[in-house]
Amino acid sequence: MSDSVTILRAPWRRLAKMIRADGTIIGYDDAKTFDIAEVTIRDLDHLAAILGKLLTRPDCCVVRGAVADLARTSRVRRLIHLDTETGDLPTIRDTNRRWVGLDVEGVTRPDDIPAADLAGCAAVAIRLLPGEFHSARCIVQATSGHGLKPGSRLRLWYWANRPLSGTELSYWLRRSPVDCCLFRAAQPTYTAAPIFETGCDHLPSRMTMLDGAEMVEAPEQEQLQPAKVAPPPPRARRPASNTEVERMIAAALFKVEMAGEGQRHQRLRAAARTIGGILDQAGIGEQEAAQALYEAVRRAGGDAVDGRNAAGTIAWGLAKGRAAPLDLGGRA
């Protein structure tokens, strides 16, 4: 089963790091738009041939995703989602790949293995990957910092027995010294050799092949998914205490008593509705509640509330409250 690799080209932009004469490493140019091409590949050898060409192309990189629209591949942004601000459409879509590119950085390099020995450096790094990678063929590529920064800094390319998603790879390699960002559909994988200000690379070669089984035997899809954790059962609810209900009634009545001119009708409506919603939990009858509310109105200033009939307002509020009882249950 063949696959493809998506190549991005940023004309007049440097997608390779630059190494100054004093060893200072200069990062990549900020590329805004790209030309996108998808190239079919048959196997790991075919991938190696393409990567060999890309070593000398500092204006190119690759991504895991596929071309979203073959009609939009020239001078486009690297987008996997619609840009709602500009209206720019996606140019890259997520897809499963048989090729696997792993960035392994910061792995300690033994003193007896020179940086130029890519096979020896890779052998140490591969031991830190899942067992399925240990005996498989792979392309070993030195990244820009290899031999300049501490440890081994390599990119290992494999061919899997089935197409794998970025999510599967992230789960499979979650405990390995691998940068899982490369498993995102639109994340650039920089494939060009660094540009040396002196014109002389400290490594005689930046790519080699390790022999082994033709393919990495990936676990089944079900094994590369996080286990689903059942949500905790809801905590039992307890009824509101008599004290809580009494406090709510007292607070509602107090607001009525303290209401000023222009506030009494609204306060009485709210208080009656609140008390009506907790009558069953309060253990008092509707007539008793109405009487308590009426007494609060009188203490506030009279039988009328802002020109309205207090008894009618109380009856309305109590009925509304009883129709929609309040849930005062707490957590056990």
Image (cartoon, rainbow, N blue to C red):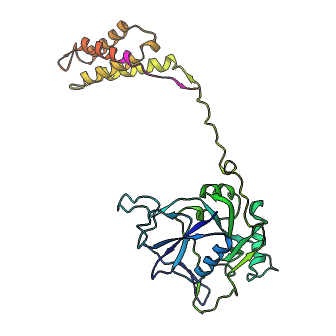
Please say whether residue 328 is one of the residues in the magenta stretch.
yes
Question: Residue placed at 47% from the left, 14% from the top?
Answer: 281
Q: Is residue 313 left or right of residue 5?
A: left
Task: For residue 25, say whether it is visible.
Answer: yes
- 118 or 146, nearer to the observer: 118
| Image spot of residue 42 (x, y percent) | 63, 69
Q: Residue at x 70, y 87 (%)?
A: 204
- As displayed, is residue 304 above or below residue 266? above
Quadrant of the image containing the N terminus: bottom right
Residue 145 percent location from the top left of the image: 64, 78
Quadrant (top left/top right/bottom left/bottom right) for the C terminus: top right
Quarter of image, res 164: bottom right
Confirm whether residue 155 shows in the render: no
The total number of labels drawn is 0
Q: Which residue, as the protein is rendered here, is positioned at the far right?
A: 112
Q: Position of residue 151 (x, y in %)?
A: 72, 75
**Quarter-of-image position of residue 117:** bottom right
Q: Position of residue 98 (x, y in %)?
A: 64, 63
47 in relation to 278, above or below: below
Give the left or right position of residue 36, taking residue 209 as reference.
left
Residue sitting at x 47%, y 80%: 13
Q: Is-magenta flag for residue 59? A: no
**Region of the chain picked out in magenta, as a range:** 321-330
Magenta: main secondary structure equals: loop
User: In this rendering, would 85 be left or right of 232?
Assistant: left
